[in-house]
Every structure is written in C-alpha cells, then in structure tokens.
Amino acid sequence: MKQFDYVRPATVAEAVSAAAQPGAVYLAAGTNLLDLMKGGVSRPDRLVDVTHLHGLDQIETLADGSLRIGALVSNADLAHDANFAKSYPAVAEALLSGASAQLRNAATVGGNLLQRTRCAYFYDTASRCNKREPGSGCDARDGENRGHAVLGWSESCIATHPSDFCVPLVALDAVVEIEGRSGRREIALEELHRLPGQTPERESALEPGDLIVAVRLLAAARGFATHARYLKVRERTSYAFAVVSAAAALRIENGKIAEARLALGGVAAKPWRARAAEDVLRNVAPTADAFQEAAWRALTDAKPSGDNAFKIELARRIVVRALTLAAAGTPARIPALPASPFASTSGAIHA
Amino acid sequence: MPELNLTSAPAHLRHGSNIGQPLTRRDGVLKVTGRATYAADNHPPGMLFAVMAVASIARGRVTSLDVAAAKRHPGVVEVMTPDHKPKLAIDPEIKTNPFVFRMEVLQSHEVRYANQPIAVVIAETLEAATEGATLLAPRYDVQTALVGLDAGESYVPPVVGVGNPTENTHGDVEAGLAAAEKQIDATYETPPQYHNAMEPHAIVAHWNGDNLQIDMPTQGLMLSLGRIAELFGIAPDKIHIRSPFLGGGFGSKGLMSGPPTLGIMAAKLVGKPVKLVLRREQMYGPVGHRAPTRQRLRIGTDGEGRLTALDHHARTVSSTFDDFYEPAADASHTLYAAPAIRTSHDAVRVNTGTPLFMRAPGEATGSIALESAIDEMAWACGIDPLAFRLKNYAEVEPMTGRPFSSKALRACYDQGAARFGWAKRSLQPRQMRDDAGLLVGWGMGTATFPALMFQAEARAVLRRDGSGAMEIGAHDMGQGAWTALAQIAADAVGLDIDRVDFKAGTSDLPDAGIAGGSAHTATAGAAIHSAGAAVIAKLADLATNDERSPLFGAGNAGVIARDGRLIRRDDESRSESYAEILARAGVAEVEARGTGAPNPAAMEEYAMHAHGAVFAEVKVDPELGQVRVSRMVGAFAAGRIVNPHLVKSQLFGGMIWGMSFALHEEAVTDRRSGRIMNANLGEYHIPVNADVPPLDVITVEEHDPHVNALGIKGVGEIGITGSAGAVANAVWHATGVRVRRFPIKIEELLTQR
C-alpha cells in the first residue's frame, strides 16, 4: 500500500485545514475508502481521521422541528433510532436495505453521502476511467454495462451513485451542512452530487477541505411519515447494490394526494429526484393509472447507456410499486427484509 | 458389530459403533476460538512477505518492470522476475503426468491470461511488498485477447475431464430423433465460475539447507509434495508439508499451482522464510476455475413420453497453453433410460487461466442443462416432471448396460416428493400465487455423482496403555475429515474415539490420496479400515497363540475387537483387553498398515453412482422479476452415511451452491480485455444467509456391497447437481418463462407482465 500520512485533528477547524491540502482525504469508517486504497484506485497522501471529532455523532431535534443527524452517526444507529424511524420511515428502510449488518454498524452518514460509484471500470485500475483519470476515456461505455446509468449520463461517464440512504433523503429535501475554509454553509442534498457531463471526476459540490458535518431532515418531511416506502430490486437479498430502487412518499388528504415525493436510485450519477412525476401526482387520487402516468414521466428522459435498456422498464415498474406501497401506508414495523419485493413474505429471516 | 447396551454411555458408544453417529466436528471449538492454525497463521522467525504482481492484460508480453522503483521503496528486500529468480530443476511446461498442469512461475515475459503472476516483491512487511508490486508499473506489448465461447475456431479435444472420451454413443440418436413423436432442441449457457474458497491460497515456505518446510492448504499432500520435489530437484523426504485445515478448496487446492510455487522460489531467493497469500482478485486466474459452457440438448420421446433419443453436446473453453475440458455432456450418461444417447464436446481456446475441477466438474454444468431439458421435454409431453422421470427411470446404466451397484433413486423421488408435497403441483406454469401475490413455482431435478475411489494407505497402532493411533495424511477442507475419519478409525481398531490418536494433515503420514471426486471418506476410510483390521489381526495372533491368554486357540473361531478388548467370536465370556495382551507379550505396541483402492473387477461389473432428488419452491415478483427460493427438499442416497450430521451439512452446502449456480454466480468477463470485472466477493454474487431458505435433507437408506468395504459413496459434490436444475425449473413453473442462460437474471423475467 502507498505510504500516507495519518492525522487526527482535534477540532473541525483543524480538520478542514488539514484536509484542504492537495492529496488529503477524510477518513470516517473507511468502508469504501480503505477498499479503494487497497485496490490502488485511490492513492491519497494524507488521511484526515475525523472519527474522533466531538459533537458529530448526535441525532437531535431542533427548535423548528427538523432533525439534525451528525455526520458520524452510524447507519445502524440512525436506522434504529426510534424517533427518526417513526418520522422518516422510508429513510430508515433504505438504510436497513443497504450493505450488510456489519457494514451498517461501521458506515457513517457523512461517508454514505460521499461513497464512490461501484462501476467496475472505476475500480479496475487497468481500465480507462474518466472519473479516476480525467481524460483517459470510459471503458464502461462499450463494456459490461448492464448495471449502468440510464439517466443523466454522458459519453464521458455512465456510472451510477450506489447509495440507498440518499434516495429517500433527496426525495424529502434533506439539507447538508458543510464546514469549509470560509465557514459553515448548507446546501440541498440534491445539489451535492453532480452529473458527469464532461467532468465526471468532479462528483460533488464540495471544495477542498469541505467537511460534511450534518444532514438535516425538515419538519415538513414528517408529513409523509404515514405513506412512505423505499423499494430496492437487487440480485440477492442482502449485501448487494440496487439494480434500481425508488423512494416514494405521499401526503394524502381527503383521499387525494396533496403532495408526492419520488426519487430513484441506481439509475444515475446522483440520487434522482423525479419532479415531473411528483407534479402529475398532485391533487389526484392515488390510483394505478396515476402511478403509471407518474412512472412514465419519471423515465421520460431515460435512455440506455449499454446493455441496460431493461433498467428503464424495471424503473417504471418499481416506481409504480413504490407508489402503490406508499399509498397503502407505512407498515407499523420495518419489514424483516427491508425494501425488498419480498418484504411481505412471512417467515423471512432478517437481511 | 452393533450391539444393544442399555447403559448411560454416550450414544455413539451405546450402539458399539462410532460410524453412523452424528458427532459434532471435533475441530469445531478450535476453529471458533481461532486456535485452528491455517497456513497463513504461521510466522516463523525472520519471515518476509511476498506479494505477486499480476498481469493486467490477458495476452501479450511484459516489456518493462520498474524493479528499481520497487526496490527503492522502504522495506522491500527483493524483486523476483523472469530475469532474476532461482532456477527450477525442470521446465514447468513439461507435463510429467496427467495431474500436472502448466503454471506461470516467471519462466518468460509472455502473458497468457489476466491476473497471471509477472513478478514477486518480497519485503519486510505486507504493506511494503504490496506497494512494491504497484511500483513495478509494468508495461506491455498488448495483443488482442481471445474471449468467450466463440473466440476462435473450435476443435474436438482428445479427452474431457480426467481422461473421459470426448464422444460417447449408444444406439442411433438420429434415428431415435427421427422416430420421435415429440422433440425438443434447446441450448443452455453457463458462465465461468471461480472456486472462491473463503481461505485464499497461501503458503509459508522455509528452506533450511535443502530441507523445505511448507505450510500450505492442499487437497493433495502427496501430489503437491511430488510436484515440489520435481520442480526444485530435491528428494521428497526433504520436504515437509503441513495442511491441517483448509478454508475450503473445491478443487482449486488439489494440484500444485503457480502461486505457492512462487512462494517457495521467493524463500529460496532471499534465504529466509517467506509468506505469500493471494488477494481475492488474484484467485481469478492462476488457480483454476469452472469453464463456461454452451450446451445443446436434443431429446425425443414416443407417444407415451418414453425417451427415444438423447443428444447432449457441450462447447467449452480451455486456456491457450494447457488442456482441461469441462465434461458437461457426460452428465447424460447415467440418469435416463434412452435407447439412443450421444454425448459430445468441442472447445475453443481463450486467454484464461487453465480451467480446472470445480466442485462437481461436468456434473454441475451438465446437470443444470440436462435437468432443464428433461423438464422442457416433460412439459412438451404434458407429463408431470416427476412422472416423466419415473417413466424413463434407468434400471441399468443406459450408456453401458451395466447394473448399478446400488441405486435407491426411486426412494429418493418418493421420499423427497412426499416431504415436499409435490403431488399438489399444477402441471401448467404460472398458476400458483402466495397471499402476497407473488408467483410461486415448483421444480425438481435429479442428482447424480459417480462413486469414485482413489488409492490410500493408513498406519494403525495399538499401545500397551490401551490406546491406539491411526495415521493418514488426510485433508480436512471443512467437510469434517478430522471427525468422520476418526470415527472410522475408532471402529477399525475397536476403541472409543477418544482413545484413538488420529493424525492427519501432514505429508509425513501415509498417503491418503487426493481429497476430491467426493472420494476422500471412501478412499481414506477404506485404508483406515484395512489398517485397523491388520493391526487387530496382529494383536489377535499374540493372544490366540499364547496359552496364558483366555483367547488361546481361538484362531479358527476368530475374535471380535470391541471397546478395547478382543472377544472370542463363539464365546463372548472369553475376552482380554488390548493392554493385557500387549503387557503379557512384553511389547510396547503393535502396528500395521493397510490400503484402500478401487476394485477394478467390481468397477467393470457395476455402474457406481450416488443419486438424489431435489425439489425447490421459488417465489418471483410478477412485475419486478426478482426471484427468491422459499424452500428446498433434497433426498440423497449415497451408500453408508458415516456421520449424518456432517453429511447433512455437506448436502446443505451443495444445495446452496446449486441455488447459487441457478440464480447468482457468474464471473463477468470484459469481452474486449478478457479481464474479470467482478473479481471480489462484493460483486461476484453468492447467496447470503438471507437468500437461503429452510433446507430439508433426507438421507435415504442405501446399502452398497460393491463400491468399497465400507459401502461409502461420498456426498461432497452431489448436492449441487439436481439442485441447480430444480431451482431453474421452479422459476419456469412460477413464470412460464424458460431461461436458458445461467444465472437467471432479472431482465429475463421482465418480458412478461
């Protein structure tokens, strides 16, 4: 392994300054970064370990009713926080459908947001990858790409963002708090991840040194709690990334959808908010026809980037199903197989 | 000699027999407490770490390696390359016997497949060696890689598997097809798969003058020892290999491969002990894999649903430099009674590491195609798949006409179907749904695997303190040899298992043969059985020839060995303990050797196979195409069951592997570069616990007087066969979609709504 410096700053300010230098990266749980380093995909000069910073591992309800989740809260701790799970059940379901129990115990909220794509060509240092080596080309474009993007991709990059957690977060207008060289700022999660365009190496809106310190879910997002689901189709029941996933949340008043939220995972370089689909669901009854219409709207701009046309049809079907499940109501308990099409199967063993 | 003994003794003693008892594995506590020493756990003083640099291209030449840069890295001690390496005693390209495969040990700059070792960096730490390997920054002269089942002109290999004829014909297949009332003609594809033992290949090699100490997981101690002796030009008795535990092998640790050889070379180069452990992705190349296949099955039936012909052709691949051919079509030799059967193979050469035996080689790939095709044929005839199989039940081995040494397959069908509830199955597909609206399908497959025997030797000892020892260089890959073979040993010498010092897993013990072909328990067990009989005979001689013994003169009547005593066969009141006999004779111990080997006469006369029937239920989301197996029942007849507990675990493992074959496993090869794009356990999918449904295994009673002295057929591989096809057939029954390319993928099931 390449030799690197390891620093453990005492404060956020020290961390930001230590990480602002070229070649420095933050280390939280390392569930993604360490694999990348072992594979030679990422070769940082300096790791800035933020796991000992104080105050970043709290889940707190703010005065305005929003929930502030520290960047170092683990996926498992967050998912099992009763108040959080009750208020934002689709987010909890997404968290529990991700990775494996062991990884969820380690992985952090901040790290999850910044995990890298699972494109095999990004991981394979012998392949050309514009994300890994800007300008080198994209071997995925004509390669083994049945899992790649169908929305928002470019000739430079067809990779997808693999997070489950981010999908319902983006649907619920989550806000990201960032500490940077010029102080604290916040942006909508939807603005955090970038589509590839000509610069797929620039994956997020973060600047050198920027540290995500918290994610905030607004009080208004609690309004969807009774009709919110996450659905994830994958190639095995646990420890697999989504082929396609969707988060659907509805606010139903008097038998009509007052407001709908919909986002897709596994289809683009960012968690994909489907606003056009949300629009057609406003003030209509939650019917199969309405959901079909929403599904078509959500995928209007989709096009295959390779052997993956099936993902477009699959995504439509997942949207319909996720909306149907959301309309049926959030279950009292998160299913034993969270987000799985088999969630309702009795006798299922926990994933 | 079982006997009823109503004492408070443990169950395995109460019946006077260790064989047949469900003992838990004797090495279990060691393993779960981390005290079982696997090869890579050894750290001799002064040990250095070796890391392989492997080719990132599949075909071409290495034109440069930046050795200087690697050597400059702190901690790097040496860099071994084709230009700087210890000389081997023989060219590793020379195949000195059929079990020798060519290996890449830095003999040239040529690259024949991706992940081929091209250099070894030796350093004081693993991290330094790893970075040194990166700093080599190899450059290549790249040639276009040969990839896939259509990579080039096909040819007919001289043999498939281990010396099987490439083509077999019985009767007139074309006439049978022409005369058929109904026919199917279907082509199936199976992907490349990798063994992926949990423990990666590893070696700790330590030269002491020309003595060589090796810690290395191996399924074949003596084969490995012989190969090392030949490669390094030293006498076999200078080499000592320890392999007490393997974290799985599945065929990939059977024969000496390149990477451990490089570890020995590295230790020689630096004159210090060296450890070399493969990274997971490095296991996708130099240590074998299951080759992909494309199989065409043409089957005909008469108006009654009886087979008129079965034609099974398999296309596979081998490497550009060596020969191993997955004998997929041979799966059609034994199961169904067709008057005409033809099996044939052809192959193309691709830039891959040479394929190898992988758990149920030929049977696994061939079985999923054959069982799918039989299912398709049954449907074409409008007959229930089980009824169809019974209608075409082979009373003798169809290809040869030989009787079976034993065959309880009908009982497997009956018991498995009853347990599963098969009788309630709808003939038509896509008829069943569960309460949640998921499609439900039921499928079945027949399991089969040959009952093989290799050669082995064992040494038995009886000591004056009343204890015994049994020595055999057997291999525990996780299957439970430490327990099952010790059970046989205990019965062989008539002692309680705790009184027998059972030694295995090192090369200084008698040769146990290879742990493969589902034959290890049978082969090693037969040697143990005969060594035990021989040592008891020696002991009996001491007693029956001594007038001071109560057994004096019992030579003709004979004695029985039980619970540490010899007992006169015709008068159980006359007996004497082993300790008394040895004490009086004034000897510390008696010892004897025994062998186990196939019986050629019996093999000529009988077809010897284990059988089984697997029933699977799957659920499929009708819109989203995701599949989940919801239950499986497997009924297997495999002769004598030495330890039902371990056997059940073996069969569970096989059934899960079969399910994995049908639904998950596939090495994704880039069609341009020939590189495996998912060479890690995150992306090379095998089932996780949450994928595995309740499994039900029935071991069907079967007594086989012909296979070997103990009547053991072996259970290591059969669990995969039948299971893969059962799951695939259940997916069809659930959806009405027949997927012929494995693993079955979501997109294949999205076509219908």
Image: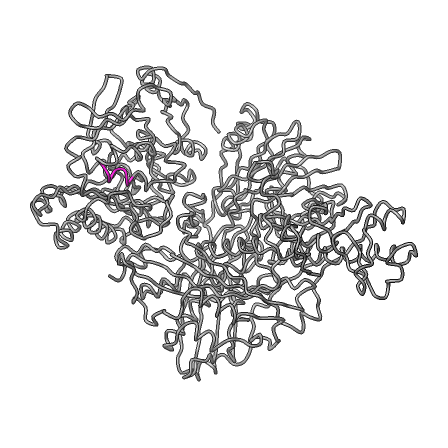
Number of residue marks? 0
Tell me: B623 left or right of A283: right
Q: At x 62% / y 42%, what residue is drawn?
A: B260
Residue A141: where, in percent of width, then height?
A: 32, 46
In-front residue for pair B498/B346: B498
Q: Is residue B100 visible?
A: no
| Residue nearest the observer in this picture, B42 or B297 | B42
Where is residue B738? Give x, y as percent: 35, 65
Quadrant position of the N terminus of chain B in the picture: bottom right
Magenta-drawn stretch contains A92: yes
Residue at the limit of the structure toward the right, as seen here: B547
Image quarter hosting the C terminus of chain B? bottom left
Left or right, B301 with respect to B78, comes to left
Above-or-below relation of A191 to B24? above
Viewer-proximal residue among B661 and A326: A326
- Relative image position of residue B321 (x, y in whole percent): 57, 53
The stretch drawn in magenta includes residue B249? no
Residues in magenta?
A88-94
Above or below residue A313? Residue B207 is above
**Type of secondary structure dominating the magenta stretch:** helix
Q: Position of residue B236 (x, y in %)?
A: 75, 45
**Is residue B542 left or right of B44 when viewed as pictured?**
right
Displayed quadrant of residue B571: bottom right
Q: Nearer the viewer, residue B660 or B45?
A: B660
The image quadrant that residue B372 belongs to is bottom left
